[in-house]
Image (cartoon, helix red, strand yellow):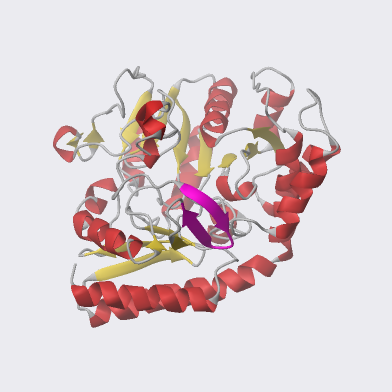
Amino acid sequence: MEEGAIYVAGGVNSGFRSGIRPTPLVFARAFGCRLIDIDGNELIDYYLGMGPMILGHNPAQVIEAAKNQLDISVLVGGQTPLEYQAAQLLTELVNSAELVRFASSGSEAVQVALRTARAATKRWKIIKFEGHYHGWFDNVFLSVSPDISKAGDPLNPHVNPGTAGQEISNNVIVLPWNNVELIEAHLKSGEIAAIIMEPVMFNIGGVMPASGYLERVREICTKYGTVLIFDEVITGFRVSVGGAQGHLGVTPDLTILGKALANGFAVAAIVGKREFMNLVGTGQVMHGGTYNSQSISMAATATTLQILKSGIPYRNIDETGKALMDGLRREFSRARIEHEVVGYPAVFNVHFDLKSPTDYRTAMQLNRLRYQNFAFEMLIRGIRILPRGTWFLSSAHEGSDIDRTLDTVREVLKAGI
C-alpha cells in the first residue's frame, strides 16, 4: 500500500478502507469465501467486500453471465432486455417494488429517493437517525458516527457533519432511533417530506428495531403524509430474499437496494410504490447516470437475483450462519465475556460488554476497543472480520470454514483480549 500511495491518495480509493489495523490490505486474488493477499496469506473472509458477495467471490453462474455479456454489449446508451428482466425479478421479490430504477451506487439511489419524496409531498425537511449511514453525499452524511461529547441532547441531537468541506442542510433533522414519540412530534408540523432509516441498524452497532417500532412509524407516516424510505443496501437479500421489509412485515414507500443485489458488480436500485416512482418515470423527478443499467452489471444482477430467488443459497447460509452464531455465543460464554450476537444468519453483529443497545448513543457504550483487538487477533490468524462488529456470510462458506473460525476464536480468547 505504501507504494500505491505514491499514485493513489492515501493508498486507498474509499475512505472507509483506511485506518484499519494493521494497514489497508492489498489482495492478489479472491475465490469462494477466501482472500489471498499479496504476501500469499490466505484468509477466510467475513467482510465479503463489505457485504455484496452473498454468493461468494466467484460464483460460476454470475461470472459466466458477465463473461458472455462481454461479447454482446458493454454500454449501449439505451436499454437492454436484461435490465427489464432484473427489474421484474425485483418486483417479484421485494414487497415495496412496484416500479424500479437502477443506479450505480447506493449513495446515488438515496438522492433519487429524497428528491422523489420532496416532489411528492411539496415539503423539504427530512428525518434521519443518529448512527444510520445513507451514503457520503453532503445532505445525508450527517451524525453517522458523531463524537458523543459534541452530539448534543440525546433527544434533540446536533446535526454533525461527517467530513471537512461538507455543506450542512438546514432541512435535515437528526433524531435518536427507536423513539416513535419524537418522530410523531415532528410529523405533526406537516413539514416532513420523508423519513429515511436502516430497518435494522447494521452500519454502526448492530441495533434491532424495538418491538412494534417499524409498524408504528409506518402508521404515522401514512397518517401525516410523510414518505417512508428504507435503506436496505445492507439488509436487502441478507435478512431474507425480500429484505428486512419482507421478514419484518413492514412495507415502506421507497426502498434503496445495493450490495448483495449484484454480488459485487456496481449496481444499486431505488424501488417503490407506483405513485412515487411514476414521478421519476415521467421525468418530473430527474434521475440520470451514464452507467445506470450497464449491460454486464445487469447480466450479473439478473443472474444473482435468479439464484437468490431459487432459495438454494439461503439453505446453506441458514445452516452455516446459525452454526457460527451459536458457536460464537458458546465460546464467548466459556471465556466469561459478556456478549450478544444479534441479527440473521447472512448478517449479524457481535457486541462486547453490553447487551441490547437501542440507538447510537447506547451502542457507543459497547466495548469497541476490546472488539477491535479481537478482530485484529483473528486477522493475523487468518480470519478476516470487520472491526465494527458486523459479520457477513456467503453461500460459499462451508461447515469446515465455520469450524476453523471457531477454533481460531477459541485460540484468541485463550490468549486473552
Left or right, 115 with reference to 408:
right
Q: Quadrant of residue 415?
A: bottom left
User: Is residue 356 visible in the rendered structure shown here?
Assistant: no
Left or right, 242 with reference to 191:
right
Left or right, 186 with reference to 218:
left
| Percent of width and height locating residue 250 | 55, 52
| Percent of width and height locating residue 320 | 52, 74
Q: Quadrant of residue 7?
A: top left
The residue positioned 82% from the left and 33% from the top of the image is 73
Tell me which segment is drawn in magenta. 27-37
Q: Quadrant of residue 313?
A: bottom right
Asked if residue 312 is positioned above or below residue 65 in the image, the reply reads: below
The N terminus lies in quadrant: top left
| Percent of width and height locating residue 77 | 78, 22
Q: Is residue 32 magenta?
A: yes
Q: Is residue 253 magenta?
A: no
Task: Report the front residue among 213 and 6.
Answer: 6
The residue positioned 70% from the left and 46% from the top of the image is 301
The residue positioned 50% from the left and 54% from the top of the image is 48
